[in-house]
Image (spheres, grey):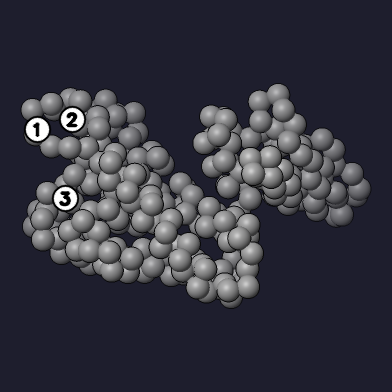
C-alpha cells in the first residue's frame, strides 16, 4: 500500500485526482530543494482552505447559536480554529509523516512544527473541495470539529482568550503577549493573583483570579476586548 493510499484510509476519503492530495502535502521547502519536481507547493491551497474552514465554522455557529451576538460568535470561531487546534487535527491523521519537505526543514523539526501542520490541514481541506466538491469538504470539516461544536452548543466549552489574543498579536504586531504576575495576596489556600499582559512595551490590561491561570485568562480577555475595540 502506498503512503497516499494509507492516508486516504485514515481520512476516509478516496481522491479521484491523487495529484491534488500530493500538492496539499507539499511544503515549499521541498520544491526549493527539488526544483525539477514539476509540482506546486500548498501555499495557495492553504489560503483557500482557511476561507473554507472559516466559512463552514461560522455558518455552523450562526445556525446553532441564533441568539449569540456577533462579537461572541467571532471570539468562539477564532478560539475554535486557532493554529494549535488545526495542528492537533493534523496530528490525528499523522499529516506530518506524509508531508513532502526539504531536508533542511525536516532536520529543524518541520514535520512537528505547528504552523506547518496547521497549514497542511487547511491545504487538505482545499484538496477535498477541489477534487470532491464543497459538500464533501464541509462534511469533512464538521466531522472533525463535531466534539468542539457540540461542546459549544451545550455551553461546555469556553472561549480560550489566551489563544485568540496570541493569534491576534501575532497577526497584527508580529509578537507574542507577555504575562507577568504583579502580586499574589492572601493565605496559601485562598490566594488572589494579579497578572498583567503586555505587547512589547505596551501594557494592555491587568487581570485577577484565584489562580495564576485564571488571572492570565482574565487579563487576556480584557486585552482582546481592548484591542478589537481599537481595531474596530
For image coordinates 58% across by 47% down, the residue present is: 164
| Residue 201 x/y as whole percent | 70, 24
For image coordinates 13% across by 37% down, the residue present is: 39
Alpha-carbon distance for marks 2 and 1? 7 Å
Residue 138 at least partly seen = yes
| Residue 74 x/y as whole percent | 57, 56
Q: How many marks?
A: 3
Pick whichever of labels 2 and 1 is earlier in the sequence.
2
For image coordinates 43% across by 56% down, the residue present is: 54
In this image, 2 relative to 85: left or right? left
Give the residue number, with chain letter if any, for mark 2: 31
Pick whichever of labels 1 and 3 is earlier in the sequence.
3
Alpha-carbon distance for marks 1 and 3? 15 Å
Give the residue number, with chain letter if any, for mark 1: 37
Circle 3 crowding by C-alpha within 10 Å: few under 14, some 14–19, many from 20: many
In the depicted structure, whether residue 62 falls above or below residue 112: below
For image coordinates 38% across by 50% down, the residue present is: 50
Quadrant showing the C terminus: top right
Pick whichever of labels 2 and 3 is earlier in the sequence.
3
Front in this rendered view, residue 216 or 71 = 71
In the depicted structure, whether residue 171 falls above or below residue 133: above
Circle 2 crowding by C-alpha within 10 Å: few under 14, some 14–19, many from 20: some
In this image, 176 relative to 202: left or right? left
Give the residue number, with chain letter if any, for mark 3: 20
Secondary element under disc 1, as helix, strand or loop, is helix
Alpha-carbon distance for marks 2 and 3? 16 Å
In this image, 14 relative to 85: left or right? left
| Residue 19 x/y as whole percent | 12, 49
Amino acid at each position: 500500500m502506498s503512503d497516499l493510499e494509507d492516508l486516504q484510509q485514515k481520512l476516509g476519503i478516496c481522491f479521484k485526482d491523487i495529484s491534488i492530495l500530493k500538492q496539499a502535502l507539499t511544503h515549499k521547502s521541498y520544491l526549493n530543494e527539488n526544483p525539477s519536481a514539476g509540482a506546486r507547493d500548498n501555499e495557495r491551497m492553504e489560503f483557500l482552505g482557511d476561507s473554507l474552514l472559516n466559512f463552514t465554522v461560522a455558518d455552523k455557529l450562526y445556525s446553532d447559536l441564533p441568539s449569540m451576538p456577533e462579537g461572541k460568535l467571532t471570539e468562539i470561531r477564532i478560539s475554535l480554529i486557532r493554529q494549535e487546534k488545526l495542528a492537533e487535527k493534523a496530528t490525528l491523521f499523522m499529516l506530518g509523516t506524509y508531508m513532502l519537505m526539504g531536508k533542511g526543514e525536516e532536520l529543524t523539526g518541520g514535520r512537528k512544527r505547528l504552523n506547518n501542520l496547521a497549514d497542511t490541514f487547511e491545504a487538505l481541506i482545499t484538496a477535498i473541495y477541489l477534487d470532491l466538491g464543497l459538500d464533501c469538504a464541509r462534511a469533512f470539516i464538521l466531522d472533525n470539529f463535531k466534539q468542539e461544536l457540540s461542546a459549544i452548543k451545550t455551553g461546555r466549552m469556553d472561549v480560550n482568550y489566551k489563544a485568540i489574543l496570541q493569534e491576534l498579536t501575532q497577526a497584527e504586531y508580529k509578537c507574542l503577549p507577555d504575562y507577568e504576575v504583579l502580586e499574589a495576596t492572601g493565605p496559601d489556600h485562598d490566594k488572589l493573583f494579579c497578572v498583567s499582559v503586555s505587547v512589547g512595551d505596551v501594557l494592555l490590561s491587568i487581570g485577577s483570579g484565584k489562580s495564576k491561570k485564571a488571572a492570565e485568562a482574565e487579563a487576556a480577555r480584557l486585552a482582546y476586548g481592548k484591542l478589537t475595540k481599537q481595531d474596530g
